[in-house]
Amino acid sequence: MVTYSEGHMMTAAEGVIGGTSLKLTFVLFVSVVVVSMFSALITAPQGDEISDFYLGNRTMSPLRNGLAMCGDYLSAVTLLGSTGLVALTGFDGLLYLLGTVVAWMMVLLLIAEPLRNSGKFTLGDTLALRLPRSQRSVRIALAACTLAICVLYIVAQLVGSIALLTQFIGEPSAATRTMCVVLIGTLLVLYVALGGMPGATFLQIVKAVMLVVGVAVTAIIVLHRYSWNLNGLLGAAAEGSGMGQRFLEPGLRYGGSTTSKLDFFSLQIAIALGLAALPHMTMRLLAPRATRVLRRSVLWATGLVAFVCFAAGVLGLGATAIVGRDSIAEVDAKGDAAVLLLANSIGGAVLTALISCLAFITLMAVAAGLMLAAASSLAHDLYGEVIRKGKASQTEELTAARLSAVVIGVLGMLLALLAYGTNTANLGFLAFAIAASAILPTMIYSLFWRRFNARGALLSLYGGLGTSVLLMVCSPVVSSAPASFYPDMDFAFFPLQNPGIVSVPAGFLLGWLGTVMGGNEESPDVYEKFEVRSMLGTEPQEEEQQEPVGARQ
Amino acid sequence: MPRHSSSPFSPQPGQMPPAPAAENRVASHPDFRSIRGAHRSFGIVAILISVGGFLLLVLMSNFAPGVLNQELFGHMTVGLVGSVGMFGLMALTAWRYTVHMERRIDPAVDRLRAEIARDEAEQARVQQPSAPQQRRFGSW
């Protein structure tokens, strides 16, 4: 999800950020990449143990797990996109940030522990345990959804990296764009194919620490400037926006029409429900060995996510107050330059370099998590369980996973280069809509509904995927509007840009419908066993937990 | 304690290997039913409060902005206070969740788990030959 993908619309010819911070950023970025690449190689799975590749070190402390979850969860959009949204639209932007935190609460309260108790490597394993008779078709459907989500999201991140580069050097030439995408994409493939989950985890932790420190330092400087008076900051922001108290009232983002209000509501639904069901998040939840470690990890992550989102709100208001809304909108119509401009004006070159390096690392870390999830889904669900019917050796599956990472990386890079210049923000939103309307219903139903069966799962997976994609194709994003892919054609019968408001209920409805239509019932034992497992977990894992910490490191 | 009636010594042809009977018996155990109920009802209420509160805020900002725009003090409006309040509400929910899990769920889970382990050990003693097949999830 990259709302700053339209950075190329920027007017400045030579970029916003000057020479010194460009050099500093480069040095910082290269050192972080070198350090994390080395540790990815060192911590990489040594043997052919497939579980090391999928889950990494399972005895990490709750704090480190929580940091990794927070790193997986918060993408560059929170850092740049949402803060820009706050800077430009005030209250509406704050609501958007709040949605990010609320979505995490869903993970904590509903999904984390049952999923961890009943899972193995991927979400497909949980579904296979729940619907053993039709596990192959369900795994195929799930892998299709996972791939669609991950590729869309990776493309959005890669295009975002070009947009970020634009902030430094101005409108990049075609060669620079290609180089940027190929460089970032190759790094991603190396992290994932060589490092597997341990490599991705290290990158996530580095990124999360940088993110927390970066936003905390900037927010402290902003608050200090207004002598820690929130009301003073709000007043200054209202003044800097040039529209007074109106800035702190809802309605700036989407104007007044009912269509645009529904569009905003639709996006909020997709975010609040979809973030919780993104494949790399569900995979991350499976890593801790014991349920109680997972609970403490998720609590840490809750605190960190809430803190970063709160600080991001302060940054957005601070940007409006200090830089001014007009200057932000002038540089980038979507406001994505807000944090960089703010850092430049209050912290000079050093803070700017820290924040921009952070933005690049954030892009890479999230994309690496997604790529790992997609590769695992391909290698474990499709290759291991469907094609080889569970008979593949661990070495074969590991090779398949590494190859899948390369394939997905190349696919993502090609699509990102093709998609450049179009309205890619919506690619990210589409990924959320698919997660919320295909994966979430299946996940919720299989965890909590006794009668749920394979037909329901297939209908809600394919139905949710199909509805979201179809509605997006038939929306103003693709045709009829000046900013769409095909501005000259008009087949946009769906008026909203975000399909969530229709596709999420459709996904749940289809899952229900498929189930009540019957057929392909599982024996009642299966659900009972699954239920016990999802409440109690498996006892062998608790035994293993007794072994001395560090035995597996 | 009810004895499980069907514990075949070997899986019948054409069927999945038999489930550990202990797990299916636990499913109807009163303790299990009560913690499952407690877990679900807490989860539903907590989700309704946090997600519902947020969606209410979004809906009101779209369709009843007048309510949110009332100024309380300085530049703080009802909407802004509500947004900051949501953070507090979520912190409260997360705290109540931990307390609930630790006091209400965890002890019962430990007890039931110990029961399953005891049953499985007993079963393994009774039927030595098929014992390894009973551990379906052993490798997980």
Image (cartoon, coloured by chain):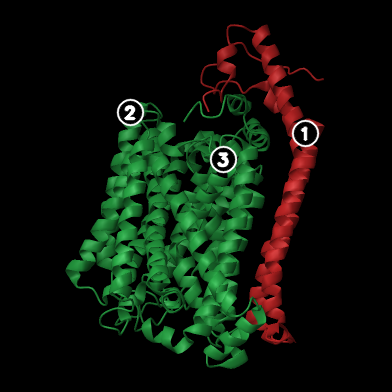
Chain letter of disc 2 in the image? A
Q: A326 or A130: which is nearer to us? A: A326
Q: Give coordinates of residue A172: x percent, y percent.
A: 23, 73
**Colour of chain A as rendered:** green
The picture places residue A362, in percent across and down from the top left corner, at 42, 59
Say if A162 sits above or below A54 in the image.
Answer: below
Determine the colour of chain B: red
Q: Which mark is residue A395?
A: 2
Cα distance in 3D space between marks 1 and 2: 40 Å
Return the residue at label 3: A61
Name the residue that disc number 1 marks: B108
Crowd rating for badge 1 (residues with CA inside 10 Å; few <14, some 14–19, many 20+): some
Q: Mark 2 near mark 3, Cβ–Cβ under 8 Å? A: no
Q: Amino acid at mark 3?
A: Ser
Name the residue nearer the viewer: A361 or A252.
A361
Instruction: Give the mark toward the camera: 3 or 1.
Output: 3
Q: Residue at x 52, y 76 (%)?
A: A316
Spot the residue most to the left.
A175
Q: Residue at x 59, y 28 (%)?
A: A545
Q: Amino acid at mark 2?
A: Thr
Q: Residue at x 51, y 60 (%)?
A: A213
Residue B63 occupies which quadrant of the picture?
bottom right
Q: CA distance from mark 2 to mark 3?
A: 29 Å
Give the alpha-carbon distance from disc 3 to disc 1, as whole Å: 25 Å
Q: Looking at the image, is A434 positioned above or below residue A92? A: above
Q: Where does the image place residue A517, in percent across and percent down from the top left?
A: 59, 49
| Tag 3 secondary structure | loop
Where is A538 relative to A2, above or below?
Answer: above
Q: Mark 1 and mark 2 in contact? Answer it, CB < 8 Å.
A: no
